[in-house]
Amino acid sequence: MVRCIVLCLFLVGCNQQKRALVLSETRGYRHASIETGVQVVAEIARELDLDVITTEDSSLLCDEKYDVVVFLNTSGNILNEEERIALKQNIQSGCGFVGVHSAADTEYEWDWYGEKLLGAWFVSHPPVSESMIEVVNREHPSTSHLPEKWFCVDEWYVYDRMPDGATILMNVNNHPIAWCSEIGSGRSFYTGRGHPMSSFNETDFINHIKGGIAWVLQ
């Protein structure tokens, strides 16, 4: 009987559904694409068999352990010290992190976030325009479906540094626009696309995000 109970508890643990937190809290510029983006990313998470929570409340970082945390067009200094500690501990213990577009316009006062977790911070951008993305790594799940030259309309960020130790996935205008890295037992993926609402209607972009989430979950 005891063996039976232990086995049942083990099987329940093995079958526990993975959890995703999609955070879109803003303390700075708020993108008009957020609501559409949240719906799209939540659907992606469900397709990856994740139990997904979407929120504007960063305190939820302290409530649970997650398998992936998505910062979707966040902006400004949104985390308090307790939330920073919770996110860092989650990542270092194996949680995946995905940053979309203005995730790079977030947490300027937290060195670990920009220098380690994300890899760079936003500095400036020219007006929204069409540009050619050079897909420099087509073996990654987020880019394997893309052509070598991907023409898109977006807001092309300029960053304050080259992401240290990261694998560059895509370049635009001769600087990185998407990359990934490993942090402790966790993984981080960032894409600079995602400013216009129309980007979340693009199948290639949706699959780009989906591949990024799948990669950080591995």
Image (tube, helix red, strand yellow):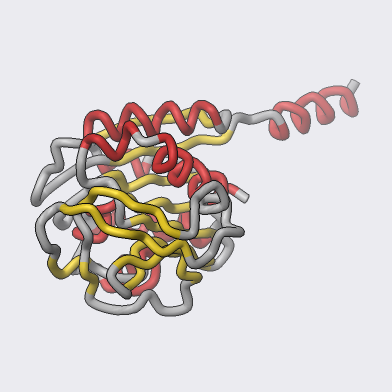
Is 120 positioned to the left or the right of 213 in the image?
A: left
Name the residue rendered at 58%, 62% in the picture: 185
Lateral position of residue 1 relative to residue 123, left or right: right
Most foreground residue, 59 or 178: 178
Question: Is residue 107 toward the left or the right of residue 118 in the image?
Answer: left
Q: Position of residue 196 (x, y in %)?
A: 20, 41
Question: Which x, y percent locates residue 61?
Answer: 35, 44
The residue at the far top in this view is 1
Q: Up-down: is 203 above or below 116?
A: above
- Taking the image as shown, residue 67 lies to the left or right of residue 81, namely right
Residue situated in front as seen by the camera: 155 or 75: 155
Residue at 32% over, 59% down: 132
Where residue 50 appears, as percent x and y from the top left, is: 53, 31
Residue 175 against residue 33 in the figure, above or below: below
For residue 106, which quarter of the picture? bottom left
- Seen in the picture, residue 143 relative to 162 is either above or below; the reply is above
Q: How many marks?
A: 0
Q: In the depicted view, which residue is nearer to us: 205 or 98?
A: 205
Asked whether residue 187 appears in the rendered view, the answer is yes
Q: In the image, what residue occupies the spot 26% across and 43% down?
A: 58
Q: Is residue 78 visible?
A: no
* Image quadrant occupied by the N terminus: top right
Residue 198 locus on image (x, y percent): 25, 35
